[in-house]
Amino acid sequence: MAIDKYEVVFISTPLIGNLVPTVEFAHHLTRHDPRFSATILIITVHERIIVNLYTQSLATAASHSQSHVNFIHLPTVQPPTRYQYQSSLGYTSLFIDKHKPHVKHAISTLASTTSVAALFVDMFTTSMIDVAQDLGIPCYLFFASPASFLGFMLHLPALATQLAADFVDSHSGLIAPKDSAIELIVPTFSKPLPPSVLPSSVLKRNKDGYFWYLEHARRYTETMGIVVNTFLELEPHAIASLSISGLPPVYPVGPILDHAGASQWHTDGAQLHDSIMEWLDQQPPSSVVFLCFGSMGSLKGPQLREIAIGLERSGYRFLWSIREPPKGKLDLPGEYTNVEAVLPAGFLDRTAGLGLVCGWVHQVRVLSHQAIGGFVSHCGWNSILESVWHGVPIATWPVYAEQQMNAFELVKELGLGVEIRLDYREGSDLVVAEELERGLRRLMDGEDEVKAKVREMKSKSRMVLMENGSSCKSLASLIQEISGRIQGLKKDC
């Protein structure tokens, strides 16, 4: 008897933080059930060199392996004109929408030779739900951020009324509460949210980013199910809060991680990585604080100088990844040609035996090293999951996107991190050296309860992926739902 085969298609926002977990989930799904194969449709943004290096490596790796994941690079499209958007999210949403004809053609071509069981969109590719509806294909959402933020997005249309009533526009362009005591109730958070931790796109209601947040959130409920890169033991309250009538079923299947990291594809790969790992090999266990702000994170000169002063004063061993701010609106952070010029005079010489300053770093490999004792992080969700997996406590320094909310959840709700700032973002007051130093001391020498919780969650993060683990069961339920739906369609025919 022939075994049914199912093809699932993924379309991701062309950013490292969205694309990498999408690719890893596709591999995870096809490894779990050999009936499934996956095709990932790649959107190209020429200005994003790092993303393009990654996507090129995927095709190369697929051609040399027995993987059941394939990749199709979509034809390029004309980007939106600068008169059509006001924010980076506005640009991204319009740019993705322009790919709908190419996505429809690619899926139709696949469907002529195989059974396409589902289309997976992500948090910002929701316009592709139209394609799934046109072709009669079940559509699911793969959500690479936490369940707490998913709940915020689903609750955002209801929150919009309160935001309009209780907040006023400030001179900075951010909305501010009329009453400083105002807090927001979001069901996936057990504690009230201070408005200061909302994403900038939500606070800047005079920009189109706010509209796009509402639009994407509205469309989540049009999907057949929502797959979240989290796990029940990490976010029990948030996941339970999403089990309500009227919402698509939620499948927490994480942690889905890229354990190899950028070492397989980044241009500075082997040589830089080897020198960093050799330096870490010489350091005592849990003695090094690692500072890294993500693939899109960068800080300007005055803030870098405050960090340098705080690190030097603290006396801790450190590994510090510094990226140059992007030169254009669509560019990602780059590498400094002379990093010494943006640091205090003599800093590198004075700390030569104590710390190491580098550019792009293979974060997941660094976090896995026994010398790392703490992580000053931008609190991107992928980074939080990596730190949990490797049992490294975090000191929070959010920068962009939903990271302020992630930081709030990590510190105030989960007790898995210590606070440097919860609400830092572009335009915030500097984190001064003394503030950083206090945070480093709590991270490296104090907060034993946090460290114990992180160790416990490290163990749980591995158990959930094993047979009978919560995420393994959730994935099995998803697979049963997809295959059952296709079988039902076949019977109807």
Image (tube, rainbow, N blue to C red):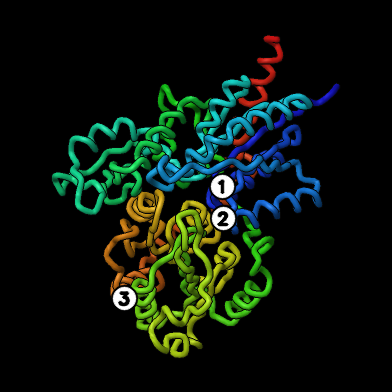
Residue at the disc numbered 3 = 433
Residue at the disc numbered 2 = 48
Q: Quadrant of residue 156?
A: top left
Tags 1 and 2 in contact by the CB under 8 Å rule? yes
**As drawn, 332 above or below 464:** below
| Quarter the N terminus occupies | top right
- Nearest to N terminus: mark 2 or mark 3: 2
- Nearest to N terminus: mark 1 or mark 2: 1
Mark 1: give few (<14), some (14-19) or many (20+) Cα within 10 Å: many
Q: Helix or strand or loop: what does disc 1 sit on?
A: loop
Question: Closer to the camera: disc 1 or disc 2?
Answer: 2
Q: How far is the residue under mark 2 from the one under mark 3?
A: 33 Å
Would residue 460 be seen by someone viewing this image from the given angle? Answer: no
- Nearest to N terminus: mark 1 or mark 3: 1
Tags 1 and 3 in contact by the CB under 8 Å rule? no
Residue at the disc numbered 1 = 14
Q: Helix or strand or loop: what does disc 3 sit on?
A: helix
> x, y percentage for residue 443?
39, 69
Residue at image location 24% in from the left, 32% down from the top: 161
Residue at image location 76% in from the left, 53% down from the top: 60
Q: How far is the residue under mark 1 from the one under mark 3?
A: 35 Å
Amino acid type for the residue under numbered disc 2:
Arg
Q: Is residue 31 left or right of residue 50?
A: right
Q: How far is the residue under mark 1 from the one under mark 2?
A: 9 Å
Q: Helix or strand or loop: what does disc 2 sit on?
A: loop
Amino acid type for the residue under numbered disc 3:
Ala
In the rendered image, the residue lying farthest to the left is: 179
